[in-house]
Image (tube, rainbow, N blue to C red):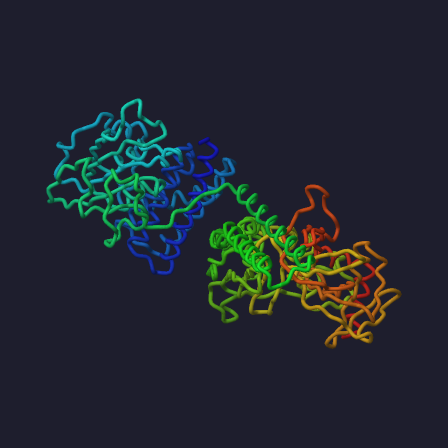
Amino acid sequence: MSMDSLRATFFAECEDLLDALNEGLNAMSDGTADTETVNAIFRAVHSIKGSAGAFALDDLVEFAHTYENVLDLIRSEALEVTPEVLKTIIRSSDILAVLVEEAHAETGNRPDSMDGVLRELSALSGKGGDSAAADPPSAEFVFDALPVQPISLDIVPTDAHFRISFAPHQALFTNSHDPVLLLTTLVGLGEAVIECDTSDVPDLDELDPSESYLSWEIALHGDIAEGEINAVFEFVDGLCTLTVDRQLPDQPDPPPSPNTGATPSATEVAAPAAADSPDAAPAASPKARQAGPAQTKRPTLRVDPERVDRLINTVGELIINQAVIAQKVVASGIAQNSDLMGDLDDYGYLARDIQEAVMAIRAQPVKPLFQRMARIAREAGDATGKDIDFVMEGEMTEVDKSLVERLSDPMTHLVRNAIDHGLEPTDDRLAVGKSPKGELRLSAEHRSGHVMIEVRDDGRGLNREKILKKAVEKGLVAEEAKLTNAEIDNLLFAPGFSTADAVTNLSGRGVGMDVVLTEIQAMGGRVTITSEPGSGSVFSIALPLTLAVLDGMVVTVGGQTLVMPLSCIVETIRPRPEDIRPFGREGFVLAIRGAYMPVVSLGALLGLDRGQIRPEKSVLVHISTGGASPIAVSVDDISDQRQVVIKSLEPNYGSIPGVSAATILGDGKIALIIDPDALAKMASKPGLSHSIRELEFEHE
């Protein structure tokens, strides 16, 4: 395995460890933590430090070592977890996460606040005595302590606390782990005597170089928690057979035999988190490793994303092929109750089951994203001097992994803006009868085939008067324009728009909300704003569940078949002739439920026809997007509603105005997929937008 692959594996494992760290810290904040929670936090930091050393990530190792010194004091009850201590260790987790990110990006940067947090950690370490702050043993010292030659276990002290049997599987070496490094780390925990069992090594002519034949027996003595032993082998979970037998200090320590099974008191450690459980299953002998160790947690498999993408594309072709065959069979006139039609239905069900299973491979909870936003919120709170109560809801909601990655930037802008602009300072909150802590709530849920993510604050709400004044000053709207609340709110998404009076590290440059809208629309989603003065604001993001398939409506325009995403369609309308009224020289409006809506021709916007709207034959599709006023789009006909497989056009054809992608229908024809946001912008050309404002004023 190449060094690049090893680094990728390390950083992927760091994500899991940071998740475990954040979960533990949340439990400590909620007051629900127990001893094992603290041990789990310590193991996470310790594991990151140990693996970071292999890649010479000195800053990460230094910080993690100082961090774990404080955590060691906490778990040994030498340091009380006061609110100040809790705040420091939570800030330390933020620094640790940033260091991992910077190491992954190979920037060499250190967080600005790192030195200050290091000083706080060192001060806390000093409260527990010198032992906690001692420097970690050097690599040279550790390797000198490791017995190079096998040593007879007859000389093991009788007061040894643990008996450990360790038998690596072939997969351990395939994943580039080294047993010597694991044993070296064990030696660093206490006094150890190690014996290598070579009895399984075959004669040279029968030896398979890729096979694993060695196993080790270790007697470990010292003031050691079993969780520390589990942490040593955490990265090789499932890649070895490991038994840990706790010995009482006054219990005779019988010499283990490499040819016998483990004693009934041994505990197999297939999953570190389950090792301390009194109900853990008896361990298997090291000799039983070929039969496979018992697993106490579900194994995970890390796969190159490109392979998953190829699989998704192949399944997409399978779905298209099934639709083509189905349409041809129906066109051939075969009876619906024939065996062939039954087999074809089974094929369709199977194809969709495969599609759902493949799409689930890319599904990932938004929890890592929300946890990252918690760090952003703490940093923004410190920068503004505001006390923030950060709340997460629905963090286990799953969404396509590619969407989670792309959501980071827009979510960062929303969180920072909510704290900087939305939440009031403590004195202002107290003056209006609010709690001194401002609440920022992130929530996620599946709703109507979409993922809904909300960023909600309980602050002052949007100052629409100030927003409109700024927009007039910047020439974004006419001074005499009369805009609705929703239109004023949407001015926040205009490029270069900002209500900040001064530029700060958090806001004022007018790029944040523009980025939010652009990124969300690029993902096929939309953003809406709800705000109540004095009560706070809610920014709602609606996203498709995946970028590979799309629920769409098939329409016909100018003899061409097109697909419109259902996510932007509010309703379809077949109006009465009197409902469509002329407006201006060539425009039309739709009178619906006491309001007026501009009508535009889809054919005219895309250049497919002259776009003549005939009220007596019009079929209208009501489109609503996050960044523009609702419009009624005129089409020739609506033929179907179906799920389609998205095929990108940009690699071959570049960007096409009003078109986001393409798909292949059941008859083998290619249909373009409409970009509703681009369509709304194309419809809002200067003349039309002016007419719309006049229309709203006239109606009101």
Q: Image height check: is 271 above or below 588?
A: above
Pick whichever, 196 or 146, lies toward us. Answer: 196
* The C terminus, quarter of image: bottom right
Q: Is residue 627 left or right of residue 376?
A: right
Q: Is residue 170 visible?
A: yes
Pick whichever, 636 or 501, lies toward us. Answer: 636
Instruction: Using the rendered view, name the quadrant where residue 9 is placed.
Output: top left
Residue 485: give x, y in percent of width and height.
68, 68
Q: Is residue 502 visible?
A: no
Pick whichever, 309 or 334, lies toward us. Answer: 334
Residue at (81% x, 69% y) in the render? 617
Residue at (33% x, 49% y) in the render? 40
Q: Image height check: is 504 above or below 631?
A: above
Residue 6: give x, y in percent of width and height.
44, 35
Instruction: Using the rendered view, name the quadrant where residue 170 is placed.
Output: top left
* The N terminus, quarter of image: top left
List the single residue furthest toward the right: 585
